Image (spheres, rainbow, N blue to C red):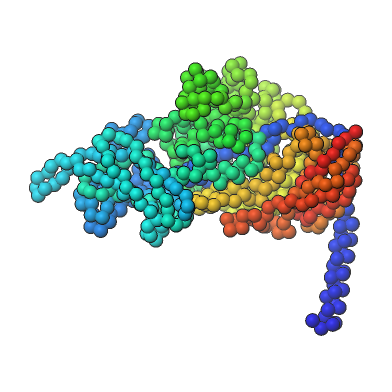
Amino acid sequence: MNPLRYRVVAMMCVLCLSFQAQLVRAQSSSITVQVDKPGGDISPTMFGIFFEDINFGADGGLYPERVKNRSFEFPEPLMAWKEIGRADSKGSVTVLEANPINANNSHYLHIEVERASAGFGVTNEGFRGIGVQLGESYTFSVYARNVAHAQRNGDALSVERNPVTLRIELEDENGRSLGKARITGLTTAWKKYAITLRPSATSLIARLNVLAEGSGAIDIDIASLFPKGTWNNRENGLRADLVQLLKDMKPGFLRFPGGCIVEGRYLKTRYQWKTTIGDLTDRRLIINRWNDEFKHKPAPDYYQSFGLGFYEYFQLSEDIGAEPLPIINCGMACQFNSSELVPLDELDPYIQDALDLIEFANGPVESSWGRLRAQMGHPAPFNLKMMGVGNEQWGPQFIERYQQFAKVLKKKHPEITLVSDSGPSPNDDRFNFLWSKLRELNADIVDEHYYMAPGWFLANSGRYDNYPRTGPKVFAGEYAAQSVGIASPNNKNNWECALAEAAFVTGLERNADVVRMASYAPLFAHVDAWQWTPDLIWFDNLRSYGTPNYYVQKLFSTNKGTHILPVLIDGSPKNGQQNLYASASLDKPSGEVVLKVVNSGASPREVKINLAGAKTVRRVGQAYVLASSDLKAENSLEGPTKVAPTKRPLTAASEFNYTFAPNSLTVLRIGSTFR
Ligand code: AHR
């Protein structure tokens, strides 16, 4: 570089640095945490998880079955399956109903092989392909029976029962073999067979072939390919990487199974928990309500096998240390769709479902539903403490139905907290009507939903500062900033949205005496099979990642503390001044003050932190910083932690300065005692 250019560049750098320093100084503020004035407790269930089978969240996602339409129960019974024949093989495949495994699984595949040659049968495409991993083992299992086969010898037709062998093959998208195994010894009775496949390579979009060898005929049903490496290595277990992401959040609760899926488009396709438990062969498949919800995102192959059913949801809650929160249908189908209603004098079976669910979860092993739980492998109760009545209902119709449920449930199970709801919007007439009624009824906790623009979340950080302190509590049950608009397929899980949510969540935490629970929604989305965006966690057939929004939730959830501490920004409880939002808590077990600060401005912000009333302050603390200079930044399968927290040491004192990065959420943990 020539000397003149060098001098100009150096001068510019100096100017730039001093401008930055001035900027930080000019914008300096103070945050006072009133350490000696701990307020109400923060519920252990404060931050949790909202699970719904949307975006292939269950089948094709958390439930790691690789075969789509494994039991041939889709209305188009061969959907996902295709006939294949090797060399000059000849035969036919049909879906039959005579003598099925059982009435809930009334269809099966009949393979008739006239000339087996190198193999004749079917191939399954999986859920947008089949993910298989080198080094992992997969169990292929199938119910099968050898059946009579009409054989033509010249003009004469004879009935034979030849022994047929099944050859199970995995192959990649180019038809290269990834492994095979055989099933022999079929009898004429339905029987379950299983073999293990160890793929010779990794593929995200493999396929599975089921081929008959030898001419004859067989029936097959519930053809399954399942990884052995599930969460806790359970048979019929859940996808380990996804459960790990959930567990890492240390969630206070797990809400399931939704969401609108509870309601169904029609009452006959509502979620009925009793059809989702017991042996897999007994679980009755139904359409997924997101199958045909969005014209711009049709998913004609989206059904619910219920391999992940209510038993598994309870088990998952236990595995990740979350309180189970099942939601039951209250006699209303989705009001965005059919709005079908169960007449008030016909609600009893619905209320009985709720009572039976409590018995299934908590009843002694001598009770009928408790016995079933024990038979499924869990004699100990699941300790159910809360239940949702209806999902996102509105109008007097909901209030009337809720009242009937509450009357019975409160009498028979006063120990169960009932979750009611306030409709789909956080501030319309439906919302106001429901809240006024639920207040009159002294409901336990009311679910509020917010699918709003990022600006709304910033502007509403103080939403609960003046909420009534008596009456029903708040469950911030579904929130997600929409970068474009509600249910737009162009919404992004970008840092701008996540940061706005963080500012809002400081408001939830500041008011944790009123807001007892909170969850982002929806939870999961398959990158090739989603209907709704944004979502907290994205995955493909083998990989997964948390969005910036996930890391916001995780930072709050893993740093929640036990008691609210009052916070003042520049001496005022108001948030959002100079782009600063803050909440603080005391974590009694560790004796730490936990301060969360959002700086939604584009400049660094030096802030004087004052731990008012602190007697002692540990010098060494920790800072967790989630920041990006790019508000449009997103994480992805290839860059899963582009926006992710970093941990830094912190030098603390009862008064100290801290510079909050531009566009950041920072969590400071400081050991302290107070006067
Ligand atoms: O989270 C997606 C949907 O949004 C939920 O199913 C419903 O409760 C809300 O309308």
Q: Measured from the top left, where is residue 23 in percent x and y?
A: 86, 59
Q: Is residue 500 left or right of residue 416?
A: right
Q: Measured from the top left, where is residue 302 in percent x and y?
A: 45, 44
407 shown above or below 148: above
Q: Measured from the top left, where is residue 638 in percent x and y?
A: 58, 58
As drawn, the residue found furthest toward the top would be: 411
Residue drawn at (85%, 77%) of the image = 8
Q: Is residue 37 left or right of residue 132?
A: right
As drawn, the residue found furthest toward the left would be: 155
Give the tally of numbered discs: 0
**Depth check: 268 or 380 in front?**
380
As drawn, the residue found furthest toward the bottom would be: 2
362 shown above or below 24: above
**Depth check: 557 or 165 in front?**
165
The quarter of the image holding the N terminus is: bottom right
**Depth check: 381 or 298 in front?**
381
